[in-house]
Amino acid sequence: MSLVIADSVKPSANGTHHHPADDRPITLEVRNLSAGYGDTVTLSDVSFAIRRGERIGLLGPNGAGKSTLFKAIMGIVPPISGDILIHQQPVSQATTRVAYVPQFEEIDWKFPVTVYDVVMMGRTRHIGWLRWSRKGDVHDRMVWDALARVQMTPFANHQISELSGGQKRRVFIARALAQEANILLLDEPFAGVDANAQNIIFNVLEALCNDGVTILLATHDLGMAATHFDKLILLNKTMLAFGRPADVFKPDILAQTFGGQMAIWKADPADSTSTMIVADHCCP
Ligand code: ADP
């Protein structure tokens, strides 16, 4: 198996922003990470460094370890070996705010709570426990602002359980906005989301990146990954590649990552540098 670390600076063919002399600070660095559950090693040899304002796609089939990587970064799953550094500090000592939007299945949607309250939970760390936000105070305003950014203001008083899949995602992204995080981890935020909600989410993420927020997002949508991210991490139990989409979307790397679960087409077969469009059949 070959490991590809492609970090060359190339002119962008896909519209994502590049910084020729990339001197932005590294916000998240993972070094030789291995992690798992009990005696089982789920993830091994993962190493990458992400800069301020970068948008990074995390790709891999089901069971590849994408969620495990997020949980390790969040300090929920302890590393077996290796290091995770946030602004050069170990996770446990990091002062940088990291927000995590977990996979759908990990959230108890029956919990009786309103949309407004879910987003206000993002303010807990700012308010402090056992204190309350008041109407019109800074926290209240941030919640309303976050709801507006994901176009969920009219649903503020609805129960979270009443919402569609795409609306629920947007509420959790609003909660992450309310956290004022510098690093945002999103675990498959587009699964089961319609095109309208997807656009809303993408516009919010784009604005966050422009404000210097670093985004790491797991997705099954390889076509989107090719066009909407600065770099991609290809994962399947171990890291198979990290680099710009055009550099990592190579048949051998994709085959190693997804096995037989995918098909590849080239946008232009005559042009060996054209971006490949890839369909992932692994998930609905
Ligand atoms: P992905 O997010 O890429 O689908 P995961 O990180 O969820 O992959 O899972 C990677 C592997 O770890 C899978 O084999 C899965 O069964 C296992 N796993 C995930 N969570 C747990 C857990 N809490 N306890 C034991 N094994 C787990």
Image (cartoon, rainbow, N blue to C red):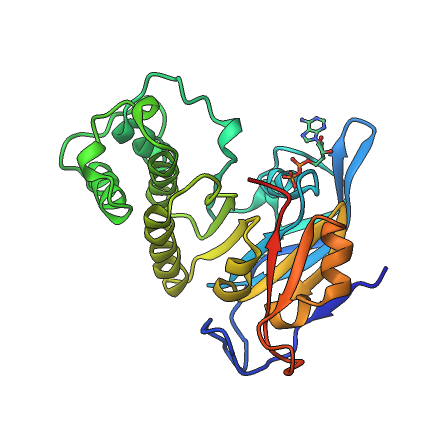
**Residue at the right extreme, as displayed:** 1
Front position in the image: 74 or 166? 166
Image mark count = 0
Q: Residue at x 50, y 59 (%)?
A: 224
Q: Position of residue 97 (x, y in %)?
A: 46, 46
Q: Residue at x 76, y 66 (%)?
A: 4
Q: Position of residue 164 (x, y in %)?
A: 34, 32
Q: Position of residue 196 (x, y in %)?
A: 32, 49
**Figure quadrant of the N terminus:** bottom right
- Position of residue 89 in the picture relative to residue 164 (left or right): right
Q: Is residue 6 above or below residue 234?
A: below
Q: Is residue 125 above or below residue 158?
A: below
- Position of residue 102 in the picture relative to residue 177 (left or right): right
Q: Is residue 135 above or below residue 232?
A: above
Residue 86 in sight:
no
**On the image, which quarter does residue 113 sit in?**
top left
Quadrant assignment for ligand 1: top right
Residue 241 in sight:
yes
Front position in the image: 169 or 284? 284
Q: Residue at x 57, y 56 (%)?
A: 222
**Figure quadrant of the C terminus:** top right
Q: Position of residue 57 (x, y in %)?
A: 56, 56
- Position of residue 150 in the picture relative to residue 226 (left or right): left
Q: Is residue 1 above or below residue 21?
A: above
**On the image, which quarter does residue 93 sit in?**
top right
